[in-house]
Image (spheres, grey):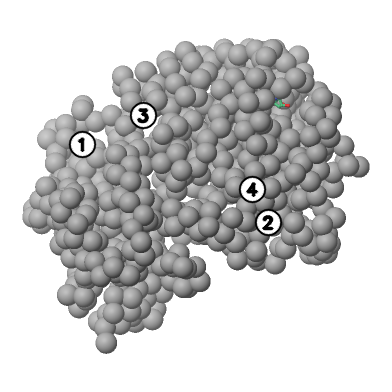
C-alpha cells in the first residue's frame, strides 16, 4: 500500500541515482518532496532600473541583445555573461557556475532573470532564469536547490509527486483549530504552496503552513519540558559558597552590577533541583566569559563536571586560555576536545571524563555526542551560534545525563521573542559594559579617503597596535571572495610591508592554516590581519585597536556590530573605520547609525526597522531555532498563538488518544520512535 513516507524512488521516473541527488536536499521521501516548500515567490514584474537599490533582489525582463559567452576557469568554475535590453537600458547579466544555462539564453528572445542588482556596475548577478516565454508564470515559486538539482526538474518532480500521491494527503490539525483560525485544509494548502493560483491563495496556504510548523515545534518543546518536570531529576548542585566567593574575589576585576545579577540568577538555578534552561544575553565585550567561568567553577566545587561548547576550534582554544587564566589550574582540571584532538590524547581525555578526573571540558559540538561519557555532567554552556535544540537535549537524556543548560549569545534578541521562540526559557541579560572601557570610535569614509586612513593607520601601528582589515562578502562565488581578499591583502602589503607583517585569512583555508595565522596575529607576529568574515565570532586580541571594514554597506548592521566588537577589548582607544559608498538612502542611513551608537539593542531594532526581516540582524547566529517556512520575526504573532494552543493541548488529558488529534500526535513523534512524549 502506498504511503506518503514511501522513498522517493517509488515515483515514476525516479531511479536510485536521481533519488540520491534529491537526497542531498534532504528530500528522501514523497512527503519530504511535497513539503519541500519554496522559500519565496517571484512576482515577475518589470522594475525601472532607477528604482532598484543596490544589492536588491529583482527580476528583470528584457530582450537578449548579445550572445551568451561562457568562461570557464579552474575546476568546475565558470561565468556566463550576456546583455539584455530593458526599455532603453542595456544591462549586463552574469551567472556563476551554472554553465548549463547557456542554452536558455537565445539572442533576440525575451527573457526574465532573477538576481541581485549591482548598482555600481549596472549589472545583475543572476540567480535564476525564469520562464519568460510562459507568461502564465507570473507568480513563480523559487526553491533552494543545489548544483545538481535544477528548479525546473524539482518542480517537475513535485508535480509527479502530487499526481501519484496527492490523494493520500490528509488533514493533520484538529477541526477545532481549523475553524478557530480559518485555516486552509492541508491537501489544498500543500498543493497551493507550490502552485498557487493567485497571491491570495498563496497567502492563505502559507498562513496555514506557518501555523502548522510553529504548532508542531511548540508541542514538541512543551512536551519535552513537561516530561522533564515530571521526572524531577534535574540536579541540585550544592556548590561551595565560600570557595565560590573566594574565586570571585581573586578575579582581576570587580564584576559589574549586571554580571553580579546574572551570576546570582544562574547560581540559584544551579542550586535548585529544577532543570536549568537559561539564555544569557549580553553585547559583545559585556563579559559573558567570566560569568561562564563562575558557573563552571561552582559546579566543580559540588563535585560535578562542566562542559563549554563553542562553534569553532579557534574559539575553543581561546576560551581554554581565558579560563585557565581565571582558574587556578591546580584546582580545576581542564581539557580541550575538538575535531583535531589527536587520537591518543582524545582517548585519554575520554577516559578522564568518564572517571571524573576532568572538571571542565571545552570544545566543539562533538563534546556531547557519540562516545563521550561523563562521570557526573552537571552543566552544559553553549556559546554563540550553537543550536542546542530538542535533539541535543534528547541525546543527553538518553545517556542518562540531565545537566543544567546555559546558552550564551551576543545577539540582541528582544526578550519576548527569546522567551517564545525558545519555549519558555528563562532569560538573563547583561545590559552594562565593564567600567573604564573607552568607547570605540566609529567613522564612515568613502573609498577615495582610504589612502589618508592608511597613512593614519601607520601611526597607530607605530605605537605597537594591531589592525584587522575585513573584506566584503561576495555571495555569488567563493572563488571571487578569495580573489578579492587576496587583492586587498596585496594592497595592504604594498602599503605596510616591510615595516609591518600582513597576514591573510579566508574561508578556503584549511582549519589548521587558519588557526596558525590567527595564532601569529595573537602573538603579534602579524600586525595586520586581512580577513573575510571568518573572524566574526568571538576572537579576542586586546592589542588590536583598528577594525577597517571594506565595502561595509554589504554587511548587515548586526554583523558590523559583531565585527566592531573585535576591537576595544583592551585599555587603549579603538577605532572602527567603515569604508563604503552606499548608493541609496537606506545604505547611508545604516552607515550613519553605526557611527552614532555602540548599543547592540538599538542597532538590532534599527536594522529590523530598515530592512524588515529577521535574517538581517543575525537570528541565524543566535541559536534560535530555524524554521522552514515561518519567520520568527515577521510571523511572531503566529508563534505566540501556536504557543498558547500547544499549551492548551497539553492540558487536555491524554490528548493523543482523542480521535481528532491523531494527525497531530503523529507529526510530533520522532521518526526513530525513540522518544515518547506520551507516557
Ligand atoms: P563577551 O561578552 O563578548 O564574551 P568577554 O567575556 O570576552 O566578553 O569579555 C571581554 C573583556 O572584558 C575580557 O577581556 C574580560 O576579561 C573583560 N572583562 C569582563 N568582565 C569585566 C569586568 N567586570 N571589569 C573589567 N573587565 C572585564
Ligand atoms: Mg564571548
Check disc 4 and report its element: helix, strand or loop. Answer: loop
Q: Earlier in the sequence, mark 3 or mark 4?
A: 4
Residue 30: x %, y % from top left: 30, 73
> Which corner quadrant of the image does residue 524 belong to?
top right
Of marks 4 and 1, the one in the foreground = 4
Vertical placement of residue 471 versus 591, above or below? below
Q: How many marks?
A: 4
Above-or-below relation of 543 to 135? above
Question: Which circle, 3 or 2, is nearer the viewer?
Answer: 2
Image point 28% across, 68% down: which residue?
658
Q: Where residue 643 appears, x then y in whole percent?
A: 35, 47
Q: Earlier in the sequence, mark 4 or mark 2?
A: 4
> Closer to the observer: label 4 or label 2?
4
For the point 80% across and 29% down, which residue is it? 245
Q: Position of residue 498 (x, y in %)?
A: 75, 26
Which mark is first along the chain, 3 or 1?
1
Q: Give the side of residue 522 with respect to residue 599, left or right.
A: right
Position of 230 with respect to 606 (left or right) is right
Q: Earlier in the sequence, mark 4 or mark 1?
A: 1
Which residue lies under the disc numbered 3? 608
Q: Which residue is mark 4?
A: 273
Amino acid at each position: 500500500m502506498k504511503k506518503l513516507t514511501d522513498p522517493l524512488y517509488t515515483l515514476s521516473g525516479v531511479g536510485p541515482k536521481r533519488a540520491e541527488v534529491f537526497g542531498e536536499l534532504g528530500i528522501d521521501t514523497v512527503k519530504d518532496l511535497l513539503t519541500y516548500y519554496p522559500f519565496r515567490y517571484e512576482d515577475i514584474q518589470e522594475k525601472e532600473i532607477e528604482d532598484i537599490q543596490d544589492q536588491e533582489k529583482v527580476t528583470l525582463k528584457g530582450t537578449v541583445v548579445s550572445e551568451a559567452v561562457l568562461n570557464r576557469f579552474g575546476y568546475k568554475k565558470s561565468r556566463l555573461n550576456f546583455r539584455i535590453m530593458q526599455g532603453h537600458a542595456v544591462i549586463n547579466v552574469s551567472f556563476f557556475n551554472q554553465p548549463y544555462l547557456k542554452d536558455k539564453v537565445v539572442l533576440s528572445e525575451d527573457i526574465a532573470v532573477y538576481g541581485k542588482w549591482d548598482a555600481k556596475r549596472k549589472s545583475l548577478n543572476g540567480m535564476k532564469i525564469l520562464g519568460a516565454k510562459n507568461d502564465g508564470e507570473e507568480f513563480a515559486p523559487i526553491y533552494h536547490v543545489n548544483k545538481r538539482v535544477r528548479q525546473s526538474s524539482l518542480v517537475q518532480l513535485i508535480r509527479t509527486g502530487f499526481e501519484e500521491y496527492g490523494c493520500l494527503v490528509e488533514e493533520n490539525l484538529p477541526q477545532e483549530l481549523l475553524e478557530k483560525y480559518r485555516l486552509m485544509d492541508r491537501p489544498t494548502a500543500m498543493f497551493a504552496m507550490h502552485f498557487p493560483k493567485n497571491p491570495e491563495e498563496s497567502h492563505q496556504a502559507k498562513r496555514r503552513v506557518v501555523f502548522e510548523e510553529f504548532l508542531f515545534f511548540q508541542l514538541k518543546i512543551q512536551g519535552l519540558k513537561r516530561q522533564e518536570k515530571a521526572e524531577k531529576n534535574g540536579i541540585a548542585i550544592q556548590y561551595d559558597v565560600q570557595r565560590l566567593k573566594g574565586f570571585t574575589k581573586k578575579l582581576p576585576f570587580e564584576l559589574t552590577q549586571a554580571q553580579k545579577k546574572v551570576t546570582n540568577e544562574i547560581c540559584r538555578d544551579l542550586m535548585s533541583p529544577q532543570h536549568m534552561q537559561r539564555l544569557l544575553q549580553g553585547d559583545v565585550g559585556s563579559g559573558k566569559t567570566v560569568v561562564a567561568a563562575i558557573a563552571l567553577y561552582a559546579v566543580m566545587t559540588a563535585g560535578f563536571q562542566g562542559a563549554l561548547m563553542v562553534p569553532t576550534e579557534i574559539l575553543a582554544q581561546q576560551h581554554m586560555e581565558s579560563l585557565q587564566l581565571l582558574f587556578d589550574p591546580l584546582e580545576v582540571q581542564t581539557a580541550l576536545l575538538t575535531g583535531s584532538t589527536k587520537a591518543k590524547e582524545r582517548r585519554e581525555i575520554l577516559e578522564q571524563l568518564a572517571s571524573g578526573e576532568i572538571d571542565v571540558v571545552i570544545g566543539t559540538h562533538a563534546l556531547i555526542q557519540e562516545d563521550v561519557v561523563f562521570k557526573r555532567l552537571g552543566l552544559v554552556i553553549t556559546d554563540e551560534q550553537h543550536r542546542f535544540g530538542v535533539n541535543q537535549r534528547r541525546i543527553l537524556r538518553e545517556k542518562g545525563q540531565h545537566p543544567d543548560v546555559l546558552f550564551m549569545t551576543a545577539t540582541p534578541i528582544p526578550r519576548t521573542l527569546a522567551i517564545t521562540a525558545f519555549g519558555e526559557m528563562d532569560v538573563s541579560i547583561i545590559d552594562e559594559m565593564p567600567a573604564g572601557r573607552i568607547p570605540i570610535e566609529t567613522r564612515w569614509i568613502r573609498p577615495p579617503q582610504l589612502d589618508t586612513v592608511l597613512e593614519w593607520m601607520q601611526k597607530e601601528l607605530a605605537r605597537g597596535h594591531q589592525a584587522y582589515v575585513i573584506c566584503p562578502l561576495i555571495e555569488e562565488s567563493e572563488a571571487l571572495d578569495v580573489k578579492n581578499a587576496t587583492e586587498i591583502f596585496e594592497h595592504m602589503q604594498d602599503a605596510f610591508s616591510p615595516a609591518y607583517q600582513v597576514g591573510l585569512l579566508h574561508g578556503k583555508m584549511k582549519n589548521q592554516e587558519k588557526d596558525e595565522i590567527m595564532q601569529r596575529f595573537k602573538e603579534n607576529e602579524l600586525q595586520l590581519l586581512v580577513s573575510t568574515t571568518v573572524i566574526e565570532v568571538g576572537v579576542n586580541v586586546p592589542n588590536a585597536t583598528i577594525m577597517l571594514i571594506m565595502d561595509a554597506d554589504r554587511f548587515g548592521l548586526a554583523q558590523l556590530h559583531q565585527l566592531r566588537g573585535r576591537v576595544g577589548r583592551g585599555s587603549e582607544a579603538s577605532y572602527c573605520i567603515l569604508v563604503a559608498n552606499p548608493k541609496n538612502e537606506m545604505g547611508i542611513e545604516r552607515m550613519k547609525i553605526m557611527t552614532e551608537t555602540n548599543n547592540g539593542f538599538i542597532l538590532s531594532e534599527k536594522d529590523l526597522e530598515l530592512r524588515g526581516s529577521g535574517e538581517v540582524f543575525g537570528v541565524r547566529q543566535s541559536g534560535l531555532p530555524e524554521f522552514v517556512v515561518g519567520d520568527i520575526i515577521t510571523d511572531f504573532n503566529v508563534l505566540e498563538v501556536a504557543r498558547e494552543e500547544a499549551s492548551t493541548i497539553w492540558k487536555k488529558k491524554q490528548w493523543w488518544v482523542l480521535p481528532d488529534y491523531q494527525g497531530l500526535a503523529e507529526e510530533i513523534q520522532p521518526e526513530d520512535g525513540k522518544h515518547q512524549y506520551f507516557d
